[in-house]
Amino acid sequence: MTARDDQKEKRRDEILRAGLELFIKKGYTATKIQDIATTVGMSVGLLFHYFPSKEELYCSLIEYGISGPMSLMAAEAPEPIAFFETAAEQVLAYIRQDSFTAKMFLLMNQAMLHEDIPQKAGEVLRSFDIYTPTAALILRGQQSGTIRPGNPLALAAAFWAAISGIAELCASYPDIPAPESEWIVDLIRARSESSSNKISSIEDGEAK
């Protein structure tokens, strides 16, 4: 990559970050392309060299938001529980390192609810399904005994809802520390016999 290409990529990243901030705070319709251009210190004409329209900029963010989780799903793991351990660790690490990741979760959840987003973005979102492949992994883990019993789709929802909720919390309250990744995985992890016995002993003691 040449120095010019590198500079162009940096400017594109600046535009995406500025757009993300404004779309979250003001919504798609209320955000004007001039607002984004002003934030990054360039003319609207120059911004159009990077993104031909506000719609394309917004859709690029949505596509980016989908590519992250789907790239995790594409990774192979020897055991399903190992996938969830790696996925939780990686996502939380990204959230700690760069607020952009946390804010992307905010944008994606807003986009799911708002009716004023571009049609193309809506179509991309409707085709996005992280829960079905996650539920299939959970079912495999249940069969091997590493994932707790329960409805696989509901457990998939619990896992991703925890990830998303933490990301939104970190985006809204940066001073609150993100939890450990293993705490999230424990939502779906099968209890070991010793752990179950310990919990039973505590419950028995409390009952007395």
Image: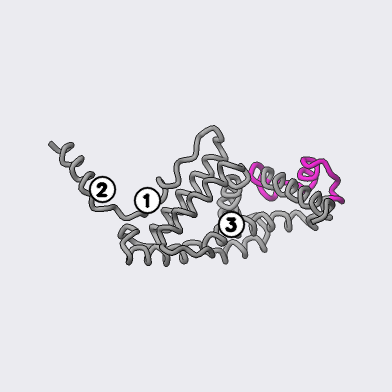
Mark 2 nearby-residue class (10 Å; few <14, some 14–19, many ≥20) = few
Q: Quadrant of the N terminus?
A: bottom right
Residues rendered magenta in the picture:
23-46
Residue under numbered circle 2: 195
- Give left or right: position of 29 versus 177: right
* Residue at 39% from the left image edge and 62% from the top image edge: 138
Give the residue furthest to the left. Answer: 208
- Give left or right: position of 73 versus 67: left
Marking on residue 147:
none
Where disc 3 sits, the SS reads helix
Q: Name which quarter of the figure residue 18 lies in.
A: top right
Residue type beneath disc 1: Leu
Residue under numbered circle 1: 187
- Give left or right: position of 90 versus 200: right
Residue type beneath disc 3: Gly
Residue 36 x/y as whole percent:
76, 45
Residue 163 x/y as whole percent:
48, 49
| Magenta stretch secondary structure, dominant | helix
Residue 165 x/y as whole percent:
49, 46
Q: Estimate the spatial distance between the alpha carbons at disc 3 and disc 2, rounded to whole Å.
A: 34 Å
Marking on residue 68:
3
* Residue at 77% from the left image edge and 52% from the top image edge: 9
Residue 150 x/y as whole percent:
32, 60
